[in-house]
Amino acid sequence: MKHLLAFSAGVDSTALFFMLLEEGVEFDIAIVDYGIREQSKDEVAYAKELASQYNKKVFVKEVQLDSSNFEASARKVRYDFFEELIKLHGYTTLITAHQLNDQLEWFLMQLSKGAGLKELIGLHKITKRDGYEIHRPILDYTKDELLKYLHQRDIKYFVDSSNIDTKYKRNYFRSKFANELISEFSNGIKKSFEYLRADLKVIYDEEKIEEYRLQELVLFRYDGDFNMALRIIDNELKKRKIILSSLQKKEILKQKEIIIKNLFSITLQDNLIWICPKNDMILDKKFKELCRVNKIPKNTRAYLKYLGVNNETILSIGNGTLFKHTSKCIKN
């Protein structure tokens, strides 16, 4: 396995860097310089210094971002960069330095917006992505524990001044609530997240969802519960880098057949969920009739035509035989 560490030179990723060294894990590092702080050049220099000292490859991306919605833009740039490296160099694992404080901050932010169990938990020790996995090995460590680790070993690290700017929502929740709660109740919070992750795993292991994929078309057969349908759709679109708003989720349940962001078609029909790219290919009458007879949703037909599927495939979709031997669990 080839591992890539998301590095920033801050407390968390620096501690994780040296923990991985102690465990004998082979890895390389990647760092993004957003160019908004003078110190960022020193952080990149430190990343290169560590890479040279410990014989690691280091990948650096420099980018200038618009200040509007900086957090979301920065995250997209960061993960696009990581995925580019993963594909280019064959890494199988992206290691990130998310820790317990991050987990609680996320939980509180989602709680304030009105979220379900899956959204509240958010971070998991292992998350599967297309072609790789994200590992978060220090998710049960507090920030103070990581600081103690660094100080005991006299290891250099940087403090990002933007992390205390409360104009960013995460920093607001960190300074107002999360830090104090972690300071006083870290053991109980740690156990609670362990229990919640275990409960979530049980829920998803018990929900047997049949799945069929044909290139970018995915078809799910489920038990008809609309809450489950939204979880399935939300999970699938996140893989395609689409985050659904609460309004979009309501519209999906209301309309049952909808185009999201002019990119993807979503259809709820009987106990089936259809998700595929939007396509405007012109259909001939014969193909339209074949799809109609076999209950293929209108917004899905053009994509099937684009794929050049044969009549047998459309018939198997219509009569449900394509689901044989494809039953699986939806995993986090």
Image (cartoon, rainbow, N blue to C red):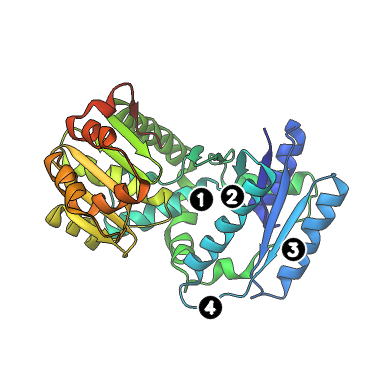
Q: CA distance from mark 1 to mark 3?
A: 22 Å
Indicate the amino acid at tag 3: Glu
Callout 4: helix, strand or loop?
Answer: loop
Residue type for callout 4: Asp
Residue under the point 38% across and 30% down: 198
Total number of numbered discs in the rendering: 4
Q: Which residue is mark 3?
A: 43
* Sequence-earlier tag: 1 or 2: 1
Of labels 3 and 2, the one closer to you: 3
* Distance Cα–Cα, label 1 vs label 2: 6 Å
Callout 4 crowding tier (Cα within 10 Å): few <14, some 14–19, many ≥20: few
**Does the residue at mark 1 contact the one at mark 2 (Cβ under 8 Å)?**
yes
How far, Cα to Cα, is label 3 from label 4? 21 Å
Q: Which mark is residue 73?
A: none
Identity of the residue furthest to the top in this view: 325
Sequence-first tag of 2 and 4? 4
Label whose residue precedes the other's in the sequence (3 or 4): 3
Q: Position of residue 101 (x, y in %)?
A: 51, 50
Look at the image and tell me in which quarter the C terminus lies.
top left
Name the residue that disc number 2 marks.
Answer: 143
Mark seen at residue 101: 1
Q: How far, Cα to Cα, is label 1 from label 4?
A: 27 Å
Q: Along the line of sight, which residue is nearer the eye, 15 or 209?
A: 209
Percent from the top left, x then y, of residue 127? Answer: 48, 39
* Closer mark to the observer between disc 1 and disc 3: 3
The residue that mark 4 highlights is 66
Q: Quadrant of the N terminus?
A: top right
Taking the image as shown, residue 265 lies to the left or right of residue 34, namely left
